[in-house]
């Protein structure tokens, strides 16, 4: 292949939620863009084999076979992993890594990445979350603040479609919302009672990437109204929720500027010592193992937090012997995540004559009320937490004396009691000692060093869990629940699928890898806009911030290219 | 059960014979376990379906477990999704069930009228509740419920399943006699 065939204006490594956004924005700006994806191609609708199957049409009615569980003890723990979705998750044996401490690294290797199987929650960060770590003494300031990202949040929200209500809350700013999904009866009671009792605890409708009422821009993408099936992770035939496959990638393709190359495992980014910048990417074909180099003026690294870090660490040169842009020595450090270890639930009497219709694909959000912009006097931990919550109605009346025969069967077919569940999404403290690194000798089937994870919880997380449990128990009581249970699921870090950091943003090249435009301080034509860039975790679901930072960084990159600075 | 397995099973049952590599015809009636390629033999599958159908019989509102094909589904789930010790517990449990039924009722479970079947199951269930979760009947019940309420009949005739609701409405009055959503 002639060199010219391998040259592009921009290369994007990864086609997931942020890579798809990089592709869309770059292509729209007229830049010839190559997207490299290590997994197979997945075309919207065409490659969703289970999207229209009823439970009884699945081989095991949706249950996981013993063999699948035995062969995939790690990935099968992931939220959403099931007989109907497992083809969008990796197989354990194909992608080993080394856990110095328990860390469940959840991956989805295909075009679209984990955007097919993501949780879809899309809250904005508050202004406090960008500054709290430094202000309250548990971390470093971001080089950007809420005002820098607010217009880009809007840009992204309008395109992907986010449902939600404008609640005017300090802890979770409003966005460009489509109509919210209704509360059910139990959720209304929860909302009303918490507000009446605490005055400052808000249960709001889910802000989720669903088209509750599509606008012209969504119809142009070929997407339609969410049908309330809640079968999202199989891929949606209606394009009811946002994924790269349904939205950004086909949009980018329509410009004529997009090339997607599946089965492309990126080995490293190639550094041009003479020019002092990256000149392209070295790719190993996943199937043939053939090595190909692609050239471009800029590179966007969107391989997912830990894989992005791995690629940078593996991109060594005379100038950067310890990984691309790694002058500070901090590449692979300050790995953080969200604390998802605790939940609670309780039964709720009443509303026997009320029900719902359809399946709500969203959850309610109990907005952070802890350490918001200041350290609470009664909190023995730093950071905040968002709580997801919902009311549900069980199937089957409570066990009657009859356990055999027609009466028994009929009782099982009736709606049962109501209940409310809650679970925590807590901020964690980025620590230099929480790291990923490359194993010195062990390699994968593509001759790329295995990743070593050394990430653990700290005492702050344990104290946060205890506080949340105390608050949740009290709030469920206030809501009118009985038989309240709280639990610690003892998840390892990583199972939250919110791993962040590794190449954090900051103003000072001595303490960070990326500047305020997500450029490597020391290699300006390389941008990192996925979870690896996170300076701290905040307590909001992170994906929409990655999309937002990506769109913002592409805009800057294109300007710099026009000015001949890149 | 997927289509391919269904065809395989039917062929074996209708034939009742296997052709060995040597070309000899051998009757396989005495080795029913292998004939289904599953944990439960034809007889055991039939028995567990009768048990499931007694737990969850046809009622004026909906067909029961037998009509839903619970036996084959239980056999498939037990074979592919359950641990070997659970499989053993069910197989041994069914043998015990058969013996106890013969002893107490003087005939096989299948030939008992519905009322007597129910009475016998209530007795076994009482024993199981005393013995705790490890009793085979707890597992038989669990499998019966799983198979029935994941079947097309269970989900659409006993419960209500709407694959594409079209919209979400958070709070609506429950209609009299309305079954639960699947």
Image: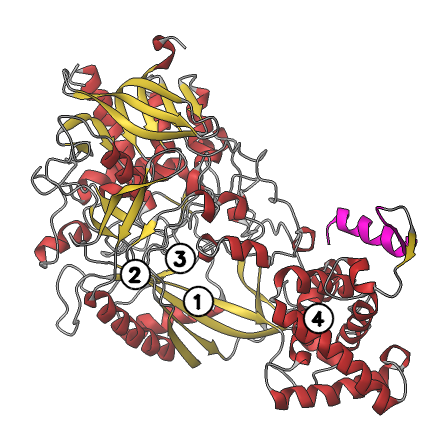
The magenta stretch is B1-21
Where residue B122 sits, quadrant-wise, is bottom right
C-alpha span from label 3 to label 4: 38 Å
Up the image or down, A133 lies above or below A234; here it is: below
Q: Which residue is mark 2?
A: A339
Q: Which residue is mark 3?
A: A205
C-alpha span from label 2 to label 1: 24 Å
- Name the secondary structure under disc 4: helix
Residue B46 placed where, x, y %? 82, 69
Q: Which residue is mark 1?
A: A187
User: For the stretch drawn in magenta, what is the main secondary structure?
Assistant: helix
Residue B6 magenta-highlighted: yes
Label 1, residues with CA under 10 Å away: few <14, some 14-19, many ≥20: many
Q: Which residue is mark 4?
A: B144
Judge left or right: residue A141 versus residue A50.
left
| Near-viewer residue (A49 or B136) | B136
Asked whether the residues under the numbered discs 2 and 3 touch, taking CB atoms below 8 Å apart as contact, a structural biologist would say no
Up the image or down, A429 lies above or below A306; here it is: below
Chain bearing tag 4 is: B
Judge left or right: residue B73 versus residue B117.
left
C-alpha span from label 1 to label 3: 9 Å
Where residue B74 sits, quadrant-wise, is bottom right
């Amino acid at each position: 292949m002639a060199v010219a065939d391998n040259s592009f204006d921009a290369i994007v490594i990864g086609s997931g939620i942020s890579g798809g956004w990089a592709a869309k924005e770059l292509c729209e700006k007229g830049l010839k863009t190559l997207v490299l994806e290590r997994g197979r191609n997945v075309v919207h609708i065409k490659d969703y084999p289970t999207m229209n199957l009823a439970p009884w049409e699945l081989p095991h009615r949706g249950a996981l076979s013993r063999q699948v569980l035995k062969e995939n003890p790690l990935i099968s723990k992931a939220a959403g992993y099931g007989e109907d979705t497992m083809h969008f998750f990796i197989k354990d044996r194909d992608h080993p890594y080394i856990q110095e401490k328990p860390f469940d690294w959840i991956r989805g290797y295909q075009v679209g990445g984990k955007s097919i199987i993501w949780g879809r929650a899309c809250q904005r960060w508050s202004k406090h979350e960008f500054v709290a770590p430094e202000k309250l003494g548990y971390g470093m300031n971001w080089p950007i603040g809420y005002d820098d990202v607010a217009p880009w949040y809007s840009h992204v929200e309008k395109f992907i479609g986010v449902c939600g209500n404008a609640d005017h809350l300090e802890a979770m700013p409003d966005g460009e919302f489509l109509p919210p999904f209704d509360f059910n009866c139990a959720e209304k009671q929860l909302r009303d009672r918490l507000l009446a009792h605490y005055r400052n605890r808000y249960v709001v409708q889910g802000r989720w990437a669903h088209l509750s009422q599509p606008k012209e821009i969504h119809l142009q993408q070929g997407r339609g109204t969410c049908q309330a099936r809640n079968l999202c992770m199989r891929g949606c035939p209606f394009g009811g929720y946002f994924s790269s496959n349904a939205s950004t990638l086909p949009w980018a393709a329509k410009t004529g500027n997009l090339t997607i190359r599946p089965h492309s495992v990126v080995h490293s980014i190639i550094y041009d010592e003479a020019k002092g910048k990256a000149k392209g990417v070295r790719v190993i074909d996943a199937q043939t193992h053939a090595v190909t180099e692609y050239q471009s003026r800029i590179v966007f690294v969107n391989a997912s937090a830990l894989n992005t870090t791995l690629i940078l660490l593996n991109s060594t040169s005379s100038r950067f012997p310890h990984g691309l842009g790694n002058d500070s020595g901090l590449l692979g450090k300050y790995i953080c995540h969200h604390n998802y270890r605790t939940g609670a639930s309780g039964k709720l009497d009443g509303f026997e004559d009320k029900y719902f219709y359809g399946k709500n694909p969203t959850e309610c959000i109990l907005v952070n009320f802890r350490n918001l912009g200041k350290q609470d006097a009664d909190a023995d931990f730093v950071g905040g937490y968002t709580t997801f919550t919902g009311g549900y109605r069980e199937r089957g009346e409570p066990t009657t004396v009859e356990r055999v025969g027609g009466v028994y069967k009929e009782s099982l077919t009736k709606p049962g009691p109501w209940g409310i569940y809650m679970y925590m999404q807590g901020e964690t403290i980025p620590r230099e000692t929480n790291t990923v690194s490359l194993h010195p000798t062990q390699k994968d089937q593509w001759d790329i060093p295995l990743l070593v994870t050394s990430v653990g919880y700290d005492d702050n997380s344990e104290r946060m869990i205890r506080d949340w449990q105390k608050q949740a128990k009290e709030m469920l009581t206030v809501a009118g629940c009985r038989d309240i249970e709280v639990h610690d699921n003892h998840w390892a870090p990583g199972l939250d699928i919110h791993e962040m950091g590794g190449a954090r943003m900051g103003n000072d090249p001595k303490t960070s890898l990326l500047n305020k435009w997500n450029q490597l301080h020391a290699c300006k034509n390389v941008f990192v806009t996925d979870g690896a860039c996170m300076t701290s975790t905040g307590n909001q679901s992170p994906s929409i911030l990655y999309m937002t930072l990506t769109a913002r960084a592409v805009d800057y990159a294109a300007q710099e290219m026009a000015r001949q600075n890149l | 059960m997927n289509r391919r397995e269904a065809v395989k099973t039917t062929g074996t049952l209708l034939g009742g014979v296997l052709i060995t590599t040597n070309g000899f015809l051998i009757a396989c009636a005495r080795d029913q376990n292998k004939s289904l390629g599953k944990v439960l033999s034809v007889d055991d599958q039939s028995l567990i379906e009768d048990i499931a159908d007694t737990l969850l019989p046809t009622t004026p509102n909906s067909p029961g477990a037998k009509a839903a094909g619970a036996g084959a589904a239980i056999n498939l789930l037990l074979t592919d999704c359950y641990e070997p010790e659970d499989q053993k517990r069910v197989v041994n449990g069914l043998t015990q069930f058969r013996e106890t039924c013969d002893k107490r009722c003087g005939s096989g479970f299948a030939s008992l009228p519905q009322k007597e079947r129910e009475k016998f199951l209530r007795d076994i269930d009482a024993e199981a509740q005393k013995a705790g979760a490890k009793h085979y009947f707890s597992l038989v019940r669990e499998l019966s419920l799983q198979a029935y309420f994941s079947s097309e009949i269970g989900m659409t005739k006993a419960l209500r399943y709407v694959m594409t609701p079209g919209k979400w409405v958070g709070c609506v009055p429950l209609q009299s006699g309305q079954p639960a959503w699947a």
